[in-house]
Image: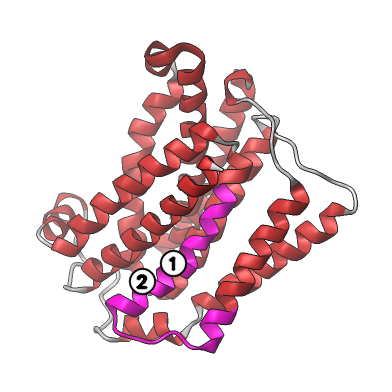
Amino acid sequence: MLSLFLAVLAALGNAMASVLQRKANRDGPVGQATGLVLFWHLVHRPAWLGGVATLVVAFLLQAAALATGPIVVVQPILVVELPFTLILASMVFHSRLHAREWTSIVGMSVGLVGMLYALQPGGGDPHRASIRDWVTGIAVCLAVASLFIVLGYRAEGTRRAAYLGLATGIGFGLVAALIAGIGAAYGASGTDGVLRAPQTYLVIVLGPWFFFLLQKTLQAGPLVASQPALTVVDPVVAVVFGIAVFDEHLRTGTWLILALFGAALIIACTLLLARSPLLQGSERTKSPMPSS
């Protein structure tokens, strides 16, 4: 139960960070800025700094959740980030949630509970995963993320935001798997295990990189284009990683019917929420930023 509670808090933190960072990215014409210039613009915006601080707290909560529960349980809970994002956006952008949004929020919650109940995920041990499986999983994630980054920078507008959102979601799912590996190393050998674990140094490198990619994603286009990918792809990648690499297991048989129904309900409600006039309206309150 502790891991579930921590995961919900992490989702809330991610949602708050997403809204704050999107607000900071749209508050000025930084679309042409890159690298240190982009960073210089953003650090002078209180909303961005607040988003960064919130994201750090959410990251720590997620790490604690992954250290106390299997990744196939923790990561799917993060899909509630989107309803949280919508609720917080209604506060920040002074809009109202209507029946459409509330119905979708309830539907997503029901789908998530039904899916987790049907699958009864658990088991597995990141510390026992073979080096070959780790290398394969990491290489596949980075290759697919790189492909979407290339596609994103060749596209414009909402397509760019969507592609970069997919790449960022894959990256965050990979980072979650690495954090699970670090947690397992700590459980087995304490601090020495963490310092010896290659996953620790990969997180140090990949974490900031995908965080920067998140800034470019939010800058590239409207939240409605990137948020579905950020919300759904992250837990999907982490769950696949958990099953394929950590040997975590799911309940199968006829329970898969309920699980698939729950997953379909989550996806449908995610798409519906992402197209909410509330989020689209919040993007129109400012002039579109030029693409970089």
Q: Amino acid at mark 1?
A: Phe
Which quadrant does the C terminus fall into? Answer: bottom left
Closer-to-camera residue (166/47): 47
Q: Is residue 285 visible?
A: yes
Q: Amino acid at mark 2?
A: Leu
Horizontal and vertical percent for residue 3? 52, 41
Instruction: Using the rendered view, name the quadrant where residue 123 is placed.
Output: top right
Q: Residue at x 18, y 67 (%)?
A: 30
Horizontal and vertical percent for residue 220? 34, 67
Q: Is residue 192 magenta?
A: no
For residue 95, above or below residue 250: below
Which secondary structure is most common in the magenta stretch?
helix
Q: Residue at x 36, y 48 (%)?
A: 58
Q: How many marks can you see?
A: 2
Q: Residue at x 59, y 52 (%)?
A: 76
Q: Which residue is disc 1 drawn over? A: 84
Instruction: Using the rendered view, name the quadrant where residue 158 is placed.
Output: bottom left
For residue 30, above or below residue 245: below
Secondary structure, mark 2, is helix
> What segment is highlighted magenta in the picture?
75-103
266 displayed left or right of 154: right
37 displayed left or right of 273: left
Q: Which residue is disc 2 drawn over? A: 88
